[in-house]
Amino acid sequence: MCKKELFGYTQNNESVSSFTLTDGFITVKVLDLGCTIQSICMKDKNGNIKDVVLGYDNVENYEKQDVFFGVVVGRCANRIGKAQFTLDGKTYSLPKNDGNNHLHGGGVIDKSIWNSEIKGNSVVFTLVSEEGAQGYPSNLCMQVTYSIENHGLVIDYKAHTDGATLCNLTNHSYFNLDGHESGSVAHQKVQIDAEYYTPIDAESIPLGENALVDNTPFDLRKPTEVCTRWDDKHEQIQNGKGFDHNFVLNGNMGELRKIANVEAANTKIKMEVLTTMPGVQFYTGNFLCAALKGKDNADYPKRSGLCLETQYYPDAINNPQWCQPIIRKGETWNHKTVYRFSID
């Protein structure tokens, strides 16, 4: 059964709850604040307990943070160029919270307290983003369910609306499979099942094309230590200050398939990523700094965690050739992502 406990209080004196899920192999703690993955713990090759996601021990730091540790972001994850889009002939303006652009829905649902309901060994979070919130049209009712199956954390996303709007929800956990406190992920190996990626400009907005990964640092079709590529002279690596790019995933959108692997350098912990989404943003924590103390008083410097954010492509709404993150009245937006763990 899922266990609920008090985690703390917000600056507005709202209570924040934690929910613990376990199958005996992995133990996951999630919060109703930001629908956050606060910890994922398991034993390493030597039997030591390792927590493999970056995060905080207190509500205060989750409210202060600007790096999205563990939270669900949306309505539209990733960037929207020039902070505007056109839907059904009408142009909508959004807050500019990333230079000239709009990032991760403006940083609102990740700071909100979601409604929660325990269902067996699952917890279901719901939240309504009201019409006009952050400039988006229509009401969007979002549901995120966390559960554990086959040593994996399953994230099931659903949404519906009373009109037409954008929807592209993802989780923004930073993983370090050697332990959240262990420093750089430089020698962890990443493999992504993608023949193409989407190049970006200097503001991290996609150029609107799919480029082959062949003979580039983005060829991660075989397990690759990320440090061998993240300071490459390639223009795209320079634009992202490391990896911060969307990969065009092989397989069919809507079909749950394995799209990535991560291998620890020391603990022998492995993670498989499965999703129904068309893309994944691979980000190597290029802009992290130790501004706020993490769990167990840990520092989280640059590149101490990596993200695999399953998603529709960044700025897709302004690139009609790509799958569109549009939801309309009567439709259900439904996707699933799984982070599955094992020991080598």
Image (spheres, rainbow, N blue to C red):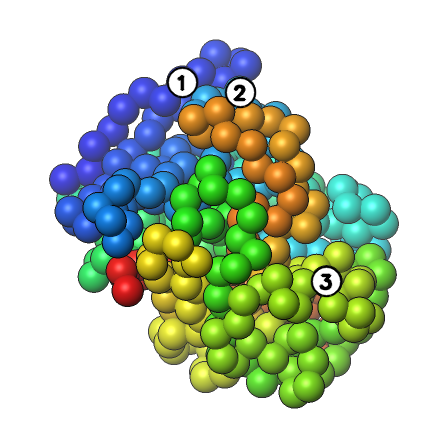
Q: Secondary structure at mark 2?
A: helix
Q: Which residue is mark 1?
A: 8
Q: Is residue 48 left or right of residue 160?
A: left
Q: Residue at x 85, y 49 (%)?
A: 100
Q: Which residue is mark 2?
A: 60
Q: Secondary structure at mark 1?
A: strand
Task: Tell which circle, 1 or 3, labels the residue nearer the N-terminal end.
Answer: 1
- C-alpha separation, residue under disc 2 versus residue under disc 1: 9 Å
Q: Residue at x 53, y 14 (%)?
A: 12
Image quarter where the N terminus lies is: top left
Q: Residue at x 36, y 41 (%)?
A: 51
Please say if 289 is above or below 275. Answer: above
Type of the residue with mark 3: Asp
Asked whether residue 168 is in view, the answer is: no
Q: Which residue is mark 3?
A: 231
Type of the residue with mark 1: Gly
Categorize mark 2 by other alpha carbons within 10 Å: few (<14), some (14-19), many (20+): few
In this rendering, which labeled residue sits more in front, label 1 or label 3? 3
Nearest the viewer among 303 and 25 is 303
Please say if 292 is above or below 27. Answer: above
Q: x, y percentage for residue 10?
A: 50, 18
- Disc 2 vs disc 3: Cβ atoms closer than 8 Å? no
Categorize mark 3 by other alpha carbons within 10 Å: few (<14), some (14-19), many (20+): some
